[in-house]
Image (tube, rainbow, N blue to C red):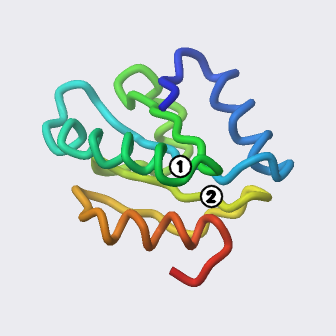
Amino acid sequence: MKKIFHTGEFEKAMADCKEGRYALVVDWTAEWCYPCQMLKPLLKKLEKTYPAIVIVQVDVDDFMPLSDVHHVRSMPTLDWYSKGGERVHRSTGVLSWETVKKYARMALGGTG
């Protein structure tokens, strides 16, 4: 997982996804968000299980304007993008491993 430290890193990750380099999961998170912390082990497992998916973490407290533009209203929020940059799903809250795998397959071009 790559933590975003400036907007340019986020824009580069989105651009690379749109160019088809990888599928992308944007993890909209906050340090104080307990459910976000509960989700981290699943995201690490996702990263190991599906190496064609890149995960970036955006702390909403550090990037409020960016999270506003992307209409993030609760956390954790995960935006799932396919290669090519199409958002295929948005999930909120803590997820099960089976649900994470379903959305990963969607991002990789499967039906879930």
- Amino acid type, callout 1: Val
Give the residue drawn at x 58%, y 84%. Answer: 111
Specify few, some or many for label 1: CA neighbours under 10 Å numbering under 14, 14-19, or 20 or more. Answer: many
- Category of crowding for the residue at label 2, using alpha-carbon neighbours closer than 10 angstroms: few (below 14), some (14–19), many (at least 20): many
**Vertical placement of 88 versus 60: above or below?**
below
Residue 88 horizontal/vertical position (percent): 59, 69
| The quadrant where residue 41 appears | top left
Instruction: Give the total of numbered labels.
Output: 2
Quick check: 110 above or below 85? Answer: below
- Looking at the rendered structure, the secondary structure element under dot 2 is strand
Q: Amino acid at mark 2?
A: Tyr
Residue tagged 1? 25
Residue at the extreme front of the image, as rendered: 49
Q: Residue furthest top?
A: 5
Q: Is residue 83 above or below residue 10?
A: below
Q: Residue furthest right?
A: 19
First along the sequence among labels 2 and 1: 1
Left or right for 14, reference 37 = right
Seen at 71% across and 41% down, the residue is 14
- Is the Cβ of the residue at disc 2 closer than 8 Å to that at disc 1? yes
Q: Which quadrant would residue 80 be assigned to in this image?
A: bottom right
Real-space Cα separation, disc 2 to disc 1, in angstroms: 6 Å
x then y, percent, for residue 84: 79, 58
Above or below, 36 against 2 in this view is: below
Q: Position of residue 23 (x, y in %)?
A: 66, 53
From the viewer's perspective, tell me whether residue 11 is left or right of residue 67.
right
For residue 9, the mark is none
Element at badge 1?
strand
Write the residue at 38% across / 63% down. 100
Label 2, on which residue? 81
Q: Position of residue 13 (x, y in %)?
A: 69, 35
